[in-house]
Image (spheres, grey):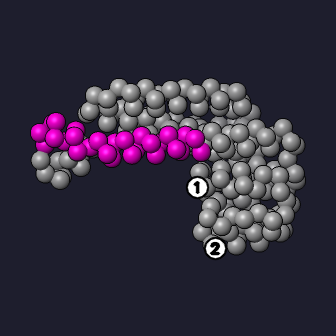
Amino acid sequence: MATLEAELVSVVDMDMETISYDDLHRRYAHTMQKVEKALENYSEYNLIMGCNQLVLEINKEIVMFHHFIRGKYRLQFPELESLVQHPIDYARVVKKIGSDMDLTQVDLQGLLQPATVMAVSFTALTSKGKLLPHDTLEKTIDVCDLALDLDAARKKVCYFVETNKGSIVETAGVSGLGICTSIL
């Protein structure tokens, strides 16, 4: 676990210039291959343990993608990262706003809590951000899509674990809620 925490710290502290768009695409493809492979290789307990590790890796990738998105999009709307801190919410909002500088035209309802929508809208009125170049915005939106895909994959893996945990506990011959919980 300490290794994963160290990796997450190194991802967060990473200089934006060291994260390339192509690297993110390669990491995304590699992580998605792991998801598919894990779901195909159904060997109960080992699968669950592998799925747990995979979810941790997906989380790490999402943190890296979030770091990339924030680094690029802060030029257009610097205050957004302090208002929307959850990586997936941030990716959804950036994707929805895109290049629009007038947030009165952007419907953020359903993406954020009403109070946060109001804060984002009011803050955008006084933001000193500048419109991103088209190619930068396009790559940023693409990385938002990758982060959202990884989140969907994470949910898929978690759903798989949730729906199969009963058979794993039965196979192991374990009874009792406390023991089951600690195994899973």
Q: Which residue is mark 2?
A: 115
The quarter holding residue 139 reads top right
Question: In percent of the image, x 60 and y 51: which residue is there?
Answer: 87
* Residue 57 vertical placement versus 123 (above, below): above
Q: Along the horizontal axis of the image, is 115 left or right of 152?
A: right
Give the secondary structure at mark 1.
loop
User: Is residue 1 in view from this perspective?
Assistant: no
* Residue 139 vertical placement versus 30 (above, below): below
Question: In percent of the image, x 13 and y 51: which residue is there?
Answer: 176
Give the secondary structure at mark 2.
helix
Q: Along the horizontal axis of the image, is 78 left or right of 8?
A: right
Q: Position of residue 180 (x, y in %)?
A: 20, 47
Residue placed most toward the observer, 104 or 81 = 104
The quarter holding residue 63 reads top right
- Estimate how packed mark 1 is, as few (under 14), some (14 to 19) or many (20 or more) residues with alpha carbons within 10 Å: few
Q: Position of residue 75 (x, y in %)?
A: 81, 50
Assign the C terminus to one quadrant of the image.
Answer: top left
Assign the N terminus to one quadrant of the image.
Answer: top left
Q: Main secondary structure of the magenta part?
A: helix
Question: Disc 1 residue type?
Answer: His
Instruction: Assess whether residue 170 is covered by the magenta stretch.
Output: yes
Mark 2 or mark 1: whose residue is earlier in sequence: 1
Q: Along the horizontal axis of the image, is 53 left or right of 31?
A: left
Q: Which residue is mark 1?
A: 86
Q: Position of residue 56 (x, y in %)?
A: 45, 39
Q: What's the distance in space between the residues labelled 2 and 1, CA to CA?
A: 15 Å
Question: Disc 2 residue type?
Answer: Ala
* Residue 18 vertical placement versus 114 (above, below): above
Whether tag 2 and tag 1 are in contact, CB under 8 A, the answer is: no
Which region is colored magenta? Answer: 148-174
Question: In percent of the image, x 69 and y 32: which residue is there?
Answer: 19
